[in-house]
Image: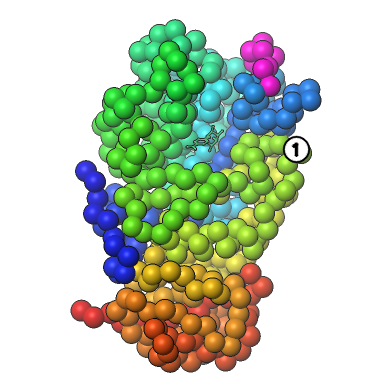
């Protein structure tokens, strides 16, 4: 059923009309880790002169014989679930979504449905999804799975689509039974390119009903189906920042740290922690999540470029995560020129990118600001009514090179 939509100026907060008990953890999390990991990593982004990553099989016209031989050498012995979970935790990420199966059809867990998986095909005896689930659970982090509907490897995807769907459901049942995922992130539903089996509205409804039946608590993204914004629980703008309310669904922007999802040795254009924090602040102020991707190297280790970027975000989050996790849209219309404002209950958070002696917040919602201070230092900030809202007058300088946060106490009419 279509949820109610918050109107601009409403006091939209985390526990708004779009979020219920089942989806609340997701709406409060704000920040998650995406992991693209599969046998494509073994190519490290290059086949001859052709540069591609998780699409390398198709975009570089690699014969299956070559791809399968390469996948047989896939040996992610340095994949350390605890290291990855600690990396996420340190960055302030509250959930992890890993590719259980990408478009190449390769299962990262020991599926019984076929042998095209890490254990049977590559002879890797460990179960990485199990290890990740255990490490995540031990650290209070939720685990979800990306699962591609589109499958290049299974001939039934083209030859006998109903048989393919039966196998897909059997794999999803395995994932649910074995790992109890908090979230399922579908993709590859946009297969109009396959004239034999375009994913229909009916296919999407049927799959969503199936997943709801076996995993009633799981959160499902909208790429399960073709009806936007009806299908699933939330929208998934990709490499783009979700806008501010009103929106008809919860929103999660998925973004890369560099430019590629899977590992590419040549892709060293890592975003700075400043850029990543700004994106996270923008999304939080819009009541949306950021799912920030890493693509481990073929060994399973995370590149220094990606881990350093996460580490930089984490340094900021350690002090200032209070303005992100559990926070959301303020109900204020527009955002100031100096940064973003988020809200959590009776607090506003002014995330100040460009520090100044006077920081103005337009006041078009019925808040009364009763006090303010710098997060971390506790240094006092004077507040006075001014123009269409409030001026905040800090007593000192910026304390953080990325963004300094001011916490303000607010009261709202009963
Ligand atoms: C898909 C995948 O093809 C890609 O490899 C990666 O996994 C990414 C997260 O998702 O790519 C998409 C999916 C949807 C859109 C664009 C690219 N889309 O809706 O515009």
Quadrant showing the C terminus: bottom left
Which residue is pictured at 45% across the width and 15% down the height? 195
Badge 1 crowding class, 10 Å Cα cut-off, few under 14, some 14 to 19, many 20 or more, is some
Name the residue rendered at 58%, 62% in the picture: 277
**Residue 90 forms part of the magenta stretch:** no
Q: Residue 336: image x %, image y %?
A: 49, 74
Can I make out residue 135 in this image?
no
- Camera-side residue: 333 or 300? 333
In the rendered image of this protein, does residue 217 appear above or below residue 414? above
Q: Secondary structure at mark 1?
A: loop
In this orientation, does residue 375 appear?
yes
> Is 160 placed left or right of 230 in the picture?
right
Judged from this view, the residue extending furthest toward the top is 159
Image quadrant in which the N terminus is located: top left
Q: Which residue is mark 1?
A: 265
| Residue occupying the point 29% across, 62% down | 7
Instruction: Tell me if residue 380 comes above or below residue 164 in the rendering.
Output: below
On the image, the x and y values in percent for residue 11 come to 30, 69
Q: Quadrant of residue 196?
A: top left
Q: Residue 376's x, y, as percent? A: 55, 78
Question: Residue at image x 43%, y 69%?
Answer: 334
Locate residue 132, reporting x and y percent.
52, 41
Residue at the limit of the structure toward the front, as seen here: 387
Residue 64 magenta-highlighted: yes
Residue 3 located left or right of residue 135? left
Q: Is residue 327 left or right of residue 403?
A: left
Q: Which residues are magenta?
A: 60-68
Looking at this view, is 87 or 26 the one in front? 26
386 shown above or below 202: below
């Amino acid at each position: 059923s279509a949820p109610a939509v918050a109107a601009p100026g409403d006091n939209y907060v985390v526990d708004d009309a779009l979020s219920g008990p089942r989806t609340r953890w997701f709406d409060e999390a704000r920040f998650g880790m995406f992991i693209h990991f599969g046998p494509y990593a073994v190519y490290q982004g290059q086949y001859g002169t052709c540069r591609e990553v998780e699409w390398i099989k198709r975009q570089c016209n690699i014969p299956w014989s070559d791809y399968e031989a390469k996948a047989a050498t896939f040996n992610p012995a340095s994949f350390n679930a605890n290291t990855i979970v600690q990396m996420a935790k340190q960055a302030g990420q509250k959930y992890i979504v890993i590719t259980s199966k990408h478009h190449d059809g390769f299962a990262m867990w020991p599926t019984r449905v076929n042998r095209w998986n890490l254990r049977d095909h590559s002879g890797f005896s460990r179960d990485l999804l199990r290890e990740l689930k255990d490490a995540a659970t031990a650290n209070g982090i939720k685990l979800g799975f990306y699962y591609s509907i589109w499958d290049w490897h299974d001939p039934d995807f083209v030859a006998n689509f109903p048989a393919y769907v039966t196998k897909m459901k059997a794999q999803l049942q395995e994932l649910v039974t074995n790992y109890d995922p908090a979230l399922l992130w579908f993709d590859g539903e946009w297969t109009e390119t396959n004239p034999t089996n375009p994913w229909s509205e009916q296919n999407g409804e049927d799959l969503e009903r199936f997943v709801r039946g076996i995993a009633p608590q799981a959160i499902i993204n909208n790429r399960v189906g073709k009806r936007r914004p009806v299908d699933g629980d939330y929208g998934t703008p990709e490499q783009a920042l979700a806008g501010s309310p009103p929106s008809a669904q919860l929103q999660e922007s998925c973004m890369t740290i560099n430019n590629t999802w899977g590992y590419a040795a040549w892709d060293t254009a890592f975003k700075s922690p400043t850029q990543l924090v700004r994106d996270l602040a923008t999304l939080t102020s819009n009541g949306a999540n950021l799912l920030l991707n890493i693509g481990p190297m073929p060994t399973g280790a995370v590149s220094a470029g990606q881990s350093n970027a996460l580490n930089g975000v984490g340094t900021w989050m350690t002090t200032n995560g209070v303005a992100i996790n559990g926070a959301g849209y303020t109900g204020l219309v527009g955002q100031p020129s100096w940064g973003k404002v988020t809200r959590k209950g009776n607090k506003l958070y002014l995330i100040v990118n460009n520090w100044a002696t006077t920081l103005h917040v337009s006041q078009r919602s019925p808040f009364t600001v009763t006090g303010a201070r710098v997060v971390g230092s506790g240094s006092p900030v004077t507040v006075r009514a001014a123009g269409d809202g409030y001026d905040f007058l800090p007593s000192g300088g910026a304390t953080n090179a990325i963004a300094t946060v001011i916490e303000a106490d607010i009261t709202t009419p009963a």
